[in-house]
């Protein structure tokens, strides 16, 4: 599957005359989560893919393919998003071709698969283009989405506080704002300054999260959210409810999405 960025409505002459625009680069939160070197064999010198702030570089010995103008796209698969999918990093090569790194996650951690234009994949070679490149040295991450979901309340411990207090944790704030995406324009979500119950720890699919509930001041019934945060894996999943419309953030696995729905009803629709 290839995603191509098109530039329309601008003539070649106008492009040459205009000042060269600044190339796109990854934001700090995306780079922190998904940047680094992914290798085909972590135990040996092997072909690798490195995601930099402003480039994707494929390296196999002396062979090097580098793309610039880097952008992240969480909607690469549209509505048919695989449960292990996390994000897509796109980059441009000379001549309008693209080198694309698709980031996924399984029980062993993050890994990258390559996509792009046919000529680019042919240059990489079929065996290497079809490999999984692992983020070597990373802490193992979440299990596949097929893991059953269970929930249990535990003492809040160091995770205690309200939603606004969570924003004082820079790691939570970075992961949360990244998950919000374009919704960072909504003040009640970014500031979390509306009514909020104490945070508490819950267990979902065998992993511990801090449950954060928040709502818009004077409109809690119709504008609210439940958020799950894993400090171990720096992951945020959530459900936002606004006047009859629900939105999931953070691309939660199916089991986690079901648990978010249950937790939302428990908090904002008790007894219904």
Image (cartoon, helix red, strand yellow):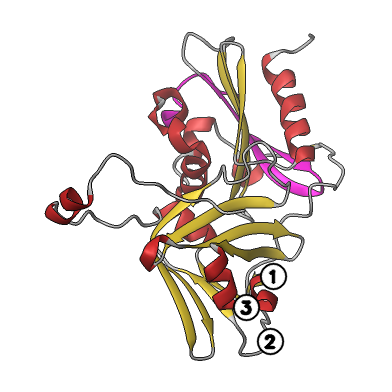
Residue matched to label 3: 125
Residue at 50% from the left image edge and 72% from the top image edge:
50
> Residue 85, image x and y in percent?
67, 51
Q: Is 210 inside the magenta-drawn segment?
A: yes
- The answer for how far apart the CA atoms under marks 2 and 3 are is 22 Å
Q: Is 46 inside the magenta-drawn segment?
A: no
> Residue 48, image x and y in percent?
57, 78
Q: In the image, which disc is placed on residue 112?
A: none
For disc 1, the neighbor class at 10 Å (few under 14, some 14 to 19, many from 20) is few
Q: Secondary structure at mark 3?
A: loop
Q: Check whether the beta carbons of the residues at disc 2 and disc 3 lie within 8 A of each other.
A: no
Q: Check whether the beta carbons of the residues at disc 1 and disc 2 lie within 8 A of each other.
A: no
Residue matched to label 1: 130
Q: Is residue 168 above or below residue 139?
A: above
> Residue 230, image x and y in percent?
64, 48
Residue matched to label 2: 43
Q: Nearer the viewer, mark 1 or mark 2?
A: 1
Nearer-N-terminus badge (3/1): 3
Q: Secondary structure at mark 2?
A: loop
The magenta region covers 190-215
Q: Secondary structure at mark 1?
A: loop
Q: Nearer the viewer, mark 3 or mark 1?
A: 3
For disc 2, the neighbor class at 10 Å (few under 14, some 14 to 19, many from 20) is few
- The answer for how far apart the CA atoms under marks 1 and 2 are is 19 Å
Residue at 73% from the left image edge and 46% from the top image edge:
83
């Amino acid at each position: 599957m290839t995603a191509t960025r098109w530039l329309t409505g601008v003539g070649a002459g106008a492009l040459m005359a205009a000042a060269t625009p600044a190339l796109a680069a990854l934001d700090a939160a995306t780079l922190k989560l998904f940047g680094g070197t992914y290798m085909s064999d972590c135990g040996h010198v092997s072909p690798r893919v490195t995601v930099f702030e402003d480039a994707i570089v494929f390296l196999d010995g002396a062979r090097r393919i580098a793309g610039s103008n880097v952008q992240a796209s969480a909607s690469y698969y549209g509505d048919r998003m695989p449960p292990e999918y996390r994000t897509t990093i796109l980059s441009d090569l000379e001549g309008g071709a693209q080198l694309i790194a698709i980031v996924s996650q399984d029980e062993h951690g993050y890994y990258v698969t390559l996509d792009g234009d046919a000529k680019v994949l042919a240059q990489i070679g079929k065996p290497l283009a079809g490999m999984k490149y692992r983020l070597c040295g990373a802490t193992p991450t979440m299990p596949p989405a097929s893991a059953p979901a269970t929930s249990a309340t535990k003492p809040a411990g160091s995770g205690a506080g309200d939603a606004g207090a969570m924003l004082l944790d820079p790691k939570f704030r970075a992961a949360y704002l990244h998950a919000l995406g374009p919704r960072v324009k909504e003040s009640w979500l970014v500031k979390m300054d509306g009514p909020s119950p104490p945070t508490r720890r819950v267990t979902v699919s065998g992993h511990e999260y801090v449950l954060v509930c928040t709502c818009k001041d004077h409109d809690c019934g119709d504008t609210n959210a439940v958020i799950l945060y894993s400090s171990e894996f720096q992951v945020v999943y959530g459900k936002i409810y606004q006047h009859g419309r629900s939105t999931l953030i953070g691309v939660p696995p199916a089991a986690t999405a079901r648990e978010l729905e249950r937790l939302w009803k428990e908090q904002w629709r008790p007894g219904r």
